[in-house]
Image: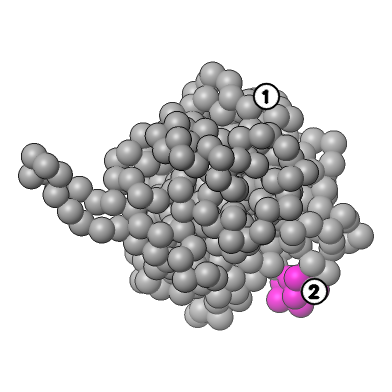
Amino acid sequence: MHPNTPSGITRRVMLSSLALVPALSGLSRPIPATAQATGGDPLPSWNNGTAKQAILDFVRATTDPSSPSHVTPEDRIAAFDQDGTLWVEHPVYTQVVYCLDRVPAVVAKRPELRTVEPFKTVLSGNREAMAKLPMKDLEKILAATLTGMSVEDFQAEASKWLATARDPRWKRPYTELVYQPMLEVLRYLRDSGYRTYIVTGGGQDFVRVYAQQVYGIPPEQVVGTAGGTKFGYAKDGKPFLTKEPKLLLNNNDAGKPEGIHLMIGRRPKAAFGNSVGDREMLEWVGAGDGPGLKMLVLHDDATREYAYGPAQGLPDSRVGTFTAALQEEAKKNGWPVISMKNDWKRIFPFE
């Protein structure tokens, strides 16, 4: 990671922007965290199978006081990756789309950037040219759109964008492209005394803007890639924090268990991911004492969502890569792999 990489963006996210598509805007609002389960089934959007049964068995075994696998309430912690695990990550991470969408507003405040690269290229709307931008230029875009402002201004701008931006495929707000089956898992675990955390390679400040409303997860339970802030005083003497292009935590790969230890202080009993960036988190959870649930989401439904791997012969992808080696490790360690195509009756709440 470049030492001046802006807060909230990992190299994984920056590389994904090589396939970026600028987002169009549309009016809407984020959705509630979940729909209520019906008929006594806590996971109504799941087909019966080994993946669903693994979740049910884990919760029953760890919450039954008479069970040898019982977990005390204070140790009931579950960690969830976000991109590709809780919501759509293709064809480009949502936060990268946000950064590109923010360029016109940044240029409006700093007109001198209009004729300066890479801002000139982004303003042109030329996808082919944007895909060729070198890493140093991408870092300039990220720095300009994610730092140099107060934390309150960032929260306000991100909230405004999330309420209006629409995904080009579904024509819906990005906050509606969450997976209904995973919302049910979040609720089921919380109803069973678990605290649910988001552990993401994406920007901590960005995810905290909407996590409570979309997932029912408060901002203090979001662990993500974190940048620095600087304390200062306004002219009226009011203190404020400014977001700086200083990386504090790269919360991806090995950074995930490191971030969990730093921010949570307890090893989770359950962890959910979908890519090689989640491997170390699942390994670390599996190395703990007592019962543990480690699961991976496989995107194998090109009709209802997307299909990419390259595990199982699916198309390769630099966004949310699920390799054959990761699948082999999951098989070896007994990590259930969730097939979106076979295990989920529905994918989105709006279906």
Q: Which is more toward the observer, 145 or 69? A: 145
Query: Horizontally, is 121 left or right of 301 in the view?
Result: left
Chief secondary structure of the magenta portion: helix
Query: Quick one: quadrant of the N terminus?
Result: bottom right
Q: The residue tagged with tag 1: helix, strand or loop?
A: loop
Q: Kindly identify the residue that appears in the image at 35 percent across and 49 percent down.
A: 148
Residue closest to the far right = 313
**Residue 16, quarter of picture:** bottom right
Q: Kindly identify the residue that appears in the image at 36 percent across and 39 percent down.
A: 155
Q: Amino acid at mark 2?
A: Ala
Residue 290 in percent (x, y) is at 51, 76
Query: Horizontally, is 75 left or right of 325 in the view?
Result: left
Q: Amino acid at mark 1?
A: Lys
Q: Which mark is residue 171?
A: 1
Category of crowding for the residue at label 1, using alpha-carbon neighbours closer than 10 angstroms: few (below 14), some (14–19), many (at least 20): few
Q: The residue tagged with tag 2: helix, strand or loop?
A: helix
In the rendered image, the vertical position of residue 311 relative to residue 346, given as above or below: below
Please tell me whether residue 327 belongs to the stretch shown in magenta: yes
Query: Horizontally, is 178 left or right of 76 in the view?
Result: right
Q: Which mark is residue 268?
A: none
The residue indicated by pointer 2 is 325
Q: Kindly identify the residue that appears in the image at 75 percent across and 75 percent down.
A: 329
Give the CA distance from mark 1 to mark 2: 35 Å
Q: Kindly identify the residue that appears in the image at 91 percent across and 60 percent down.
A: 313
User: Which of the two discs, 1 and 2, sits closer to the camera?
Assistant: 1
Residue 111 in percent (x, y) is at 45, 35
Which portion, as a residue range, is magenta? Answer: 326-334
